[in-house]
Image (cartoon, helix red, strand yellow):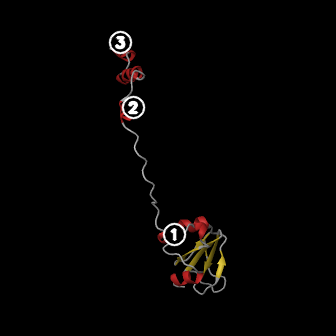
Amino acid sequence: MFHRIRRRAAEPSEAQRWFFEAARLEGQGPSEVEQARAVMEPAEPAPVVDDFLPPDLRMPSHDQLDGRMTQWKQPLVLDGELVGCAECGAYRDWLVLSTHDQIWLRCRLGHQQHETRLDTAWYNRHTGPADATHATFEDCLRHLGH
């Protein structure tokens, strides 16, 4: 019984035989793919088409904007501490402003404070895509209801 197992192991397997046969035939003639490429004529280049949106439908990129802002209705907790307005004590219904790699918080009464514990990466993780662009800061405040 063990003799048969050893003899079977000494013979090449089906996969090895197939590999050796393919390697032997490799350089003998063109493959089907090479034959098909030789028959095909080079196609005409496709016409160049402007596939971008028209200029009036494009959103400006982040480097073309002075800043971005979003609403943050719930209380903001950073490092286990509830963030409150330094002037009026408000702790919810913030506008979060991202400008020049800084984050500013603006309360409902219009007081603004620089928040050093937040950065642009935090802002990008917690906001969605822009739904509008505005020419002035006041237009954006009106759009967000402040």
Residue closer to the observer: 103 or 7: 103
Name which of mark 1 and mark 3 comes first in the sequence. Answer: 3
Identify the secondary structure beneath mark 2: helix
Dot 3 corresponds to which residue? 3
Residue 113 drawn at (x, y percent)? 66, 79
Identify the secondary structure beneath mark 1: loop
Q: Residue at x 45, y 55 (%)?
A: 48
> Cα distance, mark 3 to mark 2?
47 Å
Quadrant position of the N terminus in the picture: top left
Q: Is residue 90 above or below residue 13?
A: below
Label 3 vs label 2, nearer the camera: 2
- Dividing the picture into quadrants, the one containing residue 7 is top left
Amino acid type assigned to the residue bearing label 1 in the image? Met
Dot 1 corresponds to which residue? 59
- Please state if 97 lies on the left or on the right of 59 as rendered: right
- Determine which of the numbered discs, if any, sits on residue 69 in the image: none
- Dividing the picture into quadrants, the one containing residue 103 is bottom right
Label 1 vs label 3, nearer the camera: 1
Dot 2 corresponds to which residue? 34
